[in-house]
Image (cartoon, grey):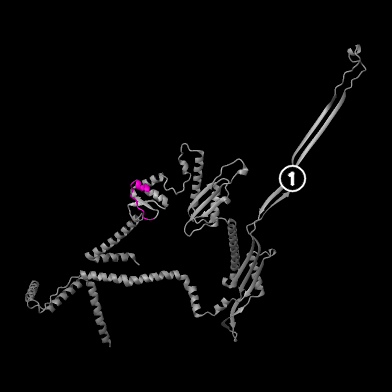
Amino acid sequence: MDFKALFSQLVVFFGKLNQAQKTIIGAAVAGIVAFLVFLVVYTSEGSSGENSGYQVLFDSLSPQDAAQVVQQLEKDKIPYKIPRDNVIEVPKDVVYKERITIASMGIPKEGHVGFELFDKQEFGATNFDQEVKFRRALEGELARSIDSLAPVEKSSVSLALPKETLFVSEAVPPSASVMVQLSADQKLSPKQIRGIKKLVASAVPKLTPENVALINSEGETLGDDDAASAMGELSSMQQQYKSKEEKKQEEKILNVLAPFIGGKDRIVAKVTIEYDFSEQSSTSEKYDPDNVVRSEQTSEEKRDGGTPASAVGGVPGAVSNIGPVQGLGGNATGEKYEKTTGTTNYEISKTVSTTKMEFARIKRMTAAVAVDGKYEAKKGADGQPTEEKEYIPLDETQLQAIDALVKQSIGVDEKRGDLVTVRNFEFQTTKEGDTKTPVTKTTAFIDTYLAPFSTLFKYLFVAVILFIAYKKIIIPFAERMLEFSRDEEEFEKPNLEIADDEDEDLVEKVQQMRKKVESQLGLGESFNEDELKYDVLLEKVREIAEEHAEEIASLIQTLIDEETVPSDIMNKR
């Protein structure tokens, strides 16, 4: 569609309209635009509430908090509205001021308070006051975290923190209780229950998940069967893993055999895998037989010398006083000592390795594969092929080749006890497909040749509908509007005919006017309408001949040629 031509047509159409039609169309367009603007403005202003002068002060309040807020608003002489349950609205100009004023008073009190309790320090607070504030802050922070879960609408946490003692036998472990209010049609999954218990236990020293009690708003205990839930989740995960791996092996078989058999619809493959999901880990130590010297120490001790000689004794007297006498020797002796000590330390090297088995170990894998045979045209009595098909099974060599392909594709290990069975059958679907009814043939033709172009057909259908609407609705409407406009622009022809019953005065006036016109045109009593028409026509022909001289000359020459040709033919005859 040429939008430029369409736009020009609309401009021309609008230009041909009279002033009244233009006024009506302009007023209609202005009314539609004003209505849309009003709708947008009304929607934006009305979204804040029924009364545009009021705005929400608090919502989702508990009855106790709502009563306190209303009491404070009445005390401050602030007008308010309660459009629905637990929602309070006040004028826009005071909403933020009142919200800050009421929040500074600790309202609403049902909300959770956290460590902001310590933002303001109180003079003279005791140790016990600080402990209570800390417990309240911790409970509020935990409740805020639990409220962030999607199924939880509101929660409450209570902690029991016993005093520490020096005696281990008298120590009491801490505990906690959590109450959750769930949203409508919502429930906590086992993972979320364990997560809540772990979250609370991790925030409190020496608190274990087993000492965290979790209940819902109906008083039902949650998480008592943690072990059973964990086992159920593990079993479900193992089953999903098993099914996924079996499906993957089946797809491998189909992808390998489909090109040779003639399509995936002529193959049926089922794989069963037995897994061992038990967790196993082993640690081994290996010692090196070759000794390695780690350290060696040697000490050596030597001594060389003798005992000193003793003095010669005797009877006191002159001989002993004058010194040793020649011929008398002392009793001195010689001595030599050696000692060597050596220590060698050897290191025995060893290797320690820890092995953890994989998540799932294949114990045994079995596969059953059924394949279709061949179909050839059955020969008649004269030896010529007919339309009837004949089934020909696969030979043993082909089945062995298929068996080998299957084993290679899925990784069969015969030592592990894996088994693959391949059988050849005549598929009933193929046999029925050879004798298709007209309905099935038509359906197959549509699915094969027309279904891929379904999207294109949709757009073509829409285009045809638009074209028909344009031809049958828009164009006739535009033509009628143009005809109506053209009829209004034409001047109404005056009716000069006078009936017999008209007033005589009117007849005389008309005759006088006619005579006056004839006298102005110079027409006398000898006026002849035929001569006047001839003169007018002759004058019109003369003007056309002057304006289009060449075309008139060519036309006359053509007429002369046409007249001369028949006369020449008659002369020859």
Q: Taking the image as drawn, is residue 252 in sight? A: yes
In the image, is residue 80 part of the stretch drawn in magenta? yes
Q: Which residues fall within the magenta stretch?
A: 71-84
Q: Is residue 322 visible?
A: no
What is the residue that sits farthest to the top in this orientation?
Answer: 318
Q: Position of residue 324 (x, y in %)?
A: 90, 15
Q: Check the picture and name the quadrant holding the N terminus.
A: bottom left
Q: Quadrant of residue 550?
A: bottom left
* Magenta stretch: dominant secondary structure: loop
Q: Residue at x 50, y 47 (%)?
A: 139
Give SS at disc 1: loop
How many residues crowd mark 1 within 10 Å: few (<14), some (14–19), many (20+)? few
Q: Residue at coordinates 24% horizontally, 64% vertically from top-left?
A: 24
Residue 300: percent from left, percent from top: 79, 33
Left or right of 3 on screen, residue 424? right
Q: Position of residue 402 (x, y in %)?
A: 64, 70
Q: Residue at x 80, y 35 (%)?
A: 341
Choose between 180 and 145: the one closer to the eye: 180
Q: Position of residue 517 (x, y in %)?
A: 9, 72
Residue annotated with mark 1: 348
Quadrant location of residue 540?
bottom left
Q: Is residue 228 left or right of residue 306?
A: left
Q: Is residue 423 magenta?
A: no
Say whether residue 334 is left or right of residue 158.
Answer: right
Q: In the rendered image, which quarter contains the C terminus?
A: bottom left
